[in-house]
Structure formats: C-alpha cells, structure tokens
Image (spheres, grey):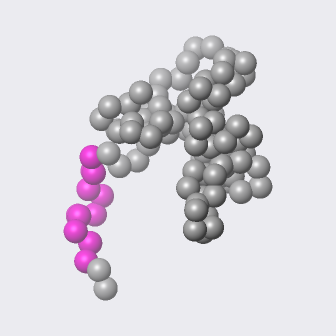
Amino acid sequence: MALNRYPRRAKLIGAGTLQIKEPMRDADPGHGAQIYAQSCAACHSRDGLGQRAQDGAGYQFPPLWGPDSFNNGGGMSRLLTAAAYATHNMPIGTTFDAPC
C-alpha cells in the first residue's frame, strides 16, 4: 500500500485547471478554426479525432470530438473549461507558470 505523501486537502502548485476571464463577447467559430489549424491540428489532427499512441494503447493526443472524445461529465465539453485548460497547458511546452 502506497503512503500518501501530501496532507489531505493540500494546495499543490500546478494542480487543477487554472481559470480564465470569461470574454465579454460571443465565441467566433471562424477565428477558432484559424487558431485550431495553427496551434492544435498538428497534435489533435485536422479532423479533431486525435492521434493514437504508437503502441496502439489509447491516444498520444486525445480526440477533441467524435466517438472517443471527452464526455460531458469531464467538463472538457464546456467551452470555458476547454479554453482554460488549453490556455494553461498547450501547445506542448506550455507550463502552468508560463501559459501561452
């Protein structure tokens, strides 16, 4: 049995999804498509169906939509949740203390 190395409810640096300020405008699907093509498609594929892991077990880069994508319970289907996660974790190399 592994021992928990952190006290219960400890605040861990870099844990969780950081929040972003909700924009005071509607989403712009055309601009979003441009950003996706420039920054996301290289990993998640042009069609958004992700890239399978080379060993065939799961995904190296998960699908963003389609049959294997996130479920409603995970929260990533919510626009602001997905935007906050992407802002603080993507593209590869982005870290919680140096968001893009």
In the rendered view, tell whether residue 70 sits above or below residue 29. Answer: below
Q: Nearer the viewer, residue 8 or 39?
A: 39
Residue 11: percent from the left, percent from the top? Answer: 27, 50
Q: Is residue 94 left or right of residue 22?
A: left
The residue depicted at 56 percent of the width and 30 percent of the height is 39
Q: Nearer the viewer, residue 60 or 74?
A: 60
In the rendered view, tell whether residue 2 sits above or below residue 53. Answer: below
In reply to whether residue 8 is colored magenta, the answer given is yes
- Picture quarter with the N terminus: bottom left
Quadrant position of residue 42: top right
The residue depicted at 58 percent of the width and 42 percent of the height is 43
Quadrant position of residue 31: top right
Quadrant position of residue 97: top left
Residue 73 seen anywhere in this rendered image of the structure: no
Q: Is residue 19 left or right of residue 66?
A: left
Residue stretch rendered in magenta on the structure = 3-13
Outermost residue to the bottom: 1
Residue 16: percent from the left, percent from the top? Answer: 40, 47
The residue depicted at 48 percent of the width and 36 percent of the height is 91
Residue 6: percent from the left, percent from the top? Answer: 23, 64
Outermost residue to the top: 25
Q: Main SS type for the magenta part?
A: loop
The residue depicted at 35 percent of the width and 39 percent of the height is 95
Residue 27: percent from the left, percent from the top? Answer: 67, 20
In the rendered view, tell whether residue 6 sits above or below residue 39. Answer: below
In reply to whether residue 23 is colored magenta, the answer given is no
In the rendered view, tell whether residue 37 sits above or below residue 12. Answer: above
Residue 79 seen anywhere in this rendered image of the structure: yes
Outermost residue to the right: 67
- Picture quarter with the C terminus: top left
